[in-house]
Amino acid sequence: MRKTLNRQQLLELFDEWGATGKYESDLESVEYRGYKVIAETVGEYFTENRETVKIVDVAAGTGLVGIKLQELGFKIMDWVDPSKGMMKTAESRNIYDKYFTEYVGENKLPIDTDRYDCCVCAGGFGEGFMPVNALFDMTRIVKPGGLVIFNVIKSNLQTTDELRDRLMPLIDTFVADNIWKTMRRETLPNQIAGSDGYLMVYKVLVSEITTVPQLPPLK
């Protein structure tokens, strides 16, 4: 259904989905576990002084990743997502410090370069979600030596026009050009029930990406 909707219709859908609580019940119905794995993976890499680690949650939705991160002892977290309906639910949980209702991957985010130790994104790449160029700003706002941690359902790499023959080649280019260093790139069994995903962890090596152009937007 999302493929037939324009941006405003999608935003209205997500606003209602997030504000009514149906979003989380729908995720539970498909046994979505990607957000738990993302939070646990952050915990594996940041084992000490978690209360000082600065994290940005991109495509943060209602804050499911943030809840798990908070349970693990992380305290400094910002929220990024275009949906005000999702933000309303996330705000009620008092997890995040700052909220940015922004589309990632089109305009430069109003966030300082090198601000965070880690950028997380659970389920942000799919039909009607973020463009692959989101990786540029996700990299910029993480300091060199920090991590970008995200997942993607494998089937989306073939069924979603924005991702097919675009996301994985761009990631490979980042690695080849020493923008990222691969820490993990592995299969995530049953990211949702019956569908495997990829769990990806990359170390950021630069502040600004100057050697790789952004991909042209799809028409």
Image (cartoon, rainbow, N blue to C red):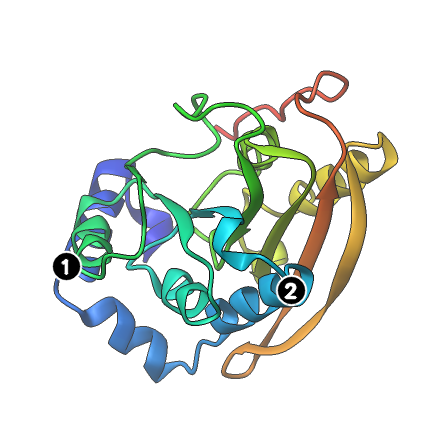
- Give 45 or 148, whichever is nearer the viewer: 45
Report the side of 219 relative to 151 (left or right). Answer: left
Q: Amino acid at mark 1?
A: Ala
- Residue at left 39%, top 60%? 66
Classed neighbour count for the residue bearing mark 2: other residues with Cα under 10 Å, few (<14), some (14–19), many (≥20)? few
Image-quadrant location for residue 69: bottom left
| x and y percentages locating residue 28 in the rendered image | 34, 80
Instruction: From the image, tell me which residue sits under label 2.
Output: 47
- Residue at left 22%, top 49%? 87
| x and y percentages locating residue 185 in the rendered image | 76, 60
Image-quadrant location for residue 24: bottom left
Looking at the rendered image, the quarter that the N terminus falls into is bottom left
Report the side of 152 relative to 87 (left or right). Answer: right
| x and y percentages locating residue 36 in the rendered image | 49, 73
Q: Amino acid at mark 2?
A: Thr
Question: Tag 2's secondary structure?
Answer: loop
Q: Is residue 153 visible?
A: no
- In this view, the residue farthest toward the front is 49
| x and y percentages locating residue 50 in the rendered image | 54, 58
- Give 94 or 203, whichever is nearer the viewer: 94
Instruction: From the image, tell me which residue sits under label 1.
Output: 19
Whether 105 is drawn above or below 93: the answer is: above
Report the side of 152 relative to 105 (left or right). Answer: right
- Residue at left 48%, top 28%? 219
